């Protein structure tokens, strides 16, 4: 039996029209902060911090309910997509089982 599930969402955003780091941070940081405040998530700016035209945002959550993890990450992805002035190039979602067999998640 699974003890819980860890979900991770990774999103790459690009803004090729941005010419400096200060401008990029002004677009990305407020979205990250609002996401943290609105949802029970851990959110971090993971990569591209020194690049002026792209960045990777990571989101993680943990629960004993697979469906809740999946839905929460979907809401986070939707929030990132609609709140920022950038283009989403790719996103990836991974949900891992804690302390149990993978087939247990099919029950959720």
Image: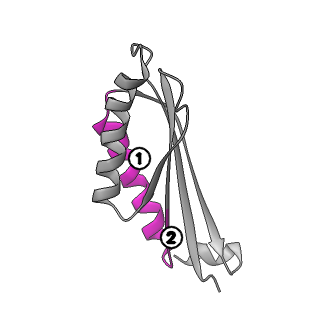
Q: Residue furthest bottom?
A: 1
Please state the extent of the stretch shown in magenta in the rendering. Answer: 61-85
Magenta stretch encompasses residue 69: yes
Report the residue at 52% width, 33% height from top: 49
**Mostly what secondary structure, the magenta segment?**
helix
Camera-nearest label, 2 or 1: 2
Query: How many numbered discs?
Result: 2
Q: Which mark is residue 68?
A: none
Q: Decide: is 37 above or below 107.
A: above
Q: Position of residue 14 (x, y in %)?
A: 46, 25
Q: Decide: is 37 above or below 24.
A: below
Q: Decide: is 71 above or below 15.
A: below
Report the residue at 47% width, 21% height from top: 52
Q: Position of residue 59 (x, y in %)?
A: 48, 53
Report the residue at 48% width, 49% height from top: 44
Q: Quadrant of the N terminus?
A: bottom right
Q: Residues within 10 Å of mark 1 (few under 14, many from 20)?
A: many
Q: Element type at marker 1?
A: helix
Residue 10 as seen in the image, left or right of residue 21 = right
Q: Nearer the viewer, residue 49 or 41?
A: 49
Q: Position of residue 30 (x, y in %)?
A: 30, 41
Tell me the residue that label 1 is attached to: 77
Magenta stretch encompasses residue 3: no
Q: Residue furthest right?
A: 101
Q: Position of residue 5 (x, y in %)?
A: 57, 72
Q: Which mark is residue 62?
A: 2
How far is the residue under mark 2 from the one under mark 1? Answer: 16 Å
């Amino acid at each position: 039996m699974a003890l819980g599930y860890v979900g991770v969402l990774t999103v790459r955003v690009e803004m090729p029209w941005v010419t400096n780091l200060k401008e990029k941070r002004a677009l990305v940081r407020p979205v990250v902060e609002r996401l943290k405040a609105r949802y029970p998530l851990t959110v971090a700016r993971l990569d591209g911090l020194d690049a002026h035209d792209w960045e990777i945002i990571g989101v993680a959550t943990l629960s004993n309910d697979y469906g809740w993890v999946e839905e929460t990450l979907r809401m986070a992805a939707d929030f990132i997509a609609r709140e920022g002035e950038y283009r989403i190039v790719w996103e990836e979602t991974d949900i891992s089982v804690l302390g149990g067999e993978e087939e247990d998640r099919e029950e959720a």
